[in-house]
Amino acid sequence: MNHWTRRIDLGRYRGPDGVPTLAGMNSPKSYDGLSAVVFIVGLHEGVMPFVAKLWDGKPTLSLPTRLPSPAWWLVSSSVIVVGFLLLWWIDSAKKRRFPDT
């Protein structure tokens, strides 16, 4: 193995049913926590700039509001789309991993 590439050995991390999984993803709550982080980032960096521009405000931690006019709404809308796709992907992975929940 090349020392520049590092691979995750999924054989080391087996779930309760023997299916290989990433470390820390052995519970449905871990998928819910990851979904919550993606949702909060998408809300803060994707939706908040649109709301802030309506009232001419600049939230402190919202990075797209500091961009010039055509770029901020492209970045914000792409954050919304990517966040939605990530939430969909995480939810489908959770349903594959834990079909009874």
Image: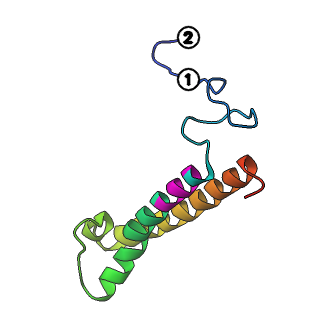
- Residue at image coords 55%, 35%: 23
Residue indicated by mark 2: 1
Q: Are marks 2 and 1 in contact (CB under 8 Å)?
A: yes
Residue indicated by mark 1: 7
Counting the numbered discs, the total is: 2
- Residue at image coords 53%, 60%: 82
Q: CA distance from mark 2 to mark 1?
A: 9 Å
In the orientation shown, which residue stands out farthest toward the bottom? 55
- Residue at image coords 31%, 74%: 69
Q: Secondary structure beneath disc 1?
A: loop
The residue stretch that appears in magenta: 30-36
Tell me the quarter of the image containing the C terminus: bottom right
Q: Amino acid at mark 1?
A: Arg
Tell me the quarter of the image containing the N terminus: top right
Q: Residues within 10 Å of mark 2 (few under 14, many from 20)?
A: few
Whole-percent x, y for residue 57 in the image: 23, 81
What mark, if any, has residue 38 been given in the picture?
none
With 62 as the anchor, is 8 left or right in this view? Answer: right
- Above or below: residue 99 compared with residue 26: below
Q: Nearer the viewer, residue 71 or 81?
A: 81
Q: Provide the major secondary structure of the magenta segment.
A: helix
Whole-percent x, y for residue 61 in the image: 26, 65
Q: Amino acid at mark 2?
A: Met
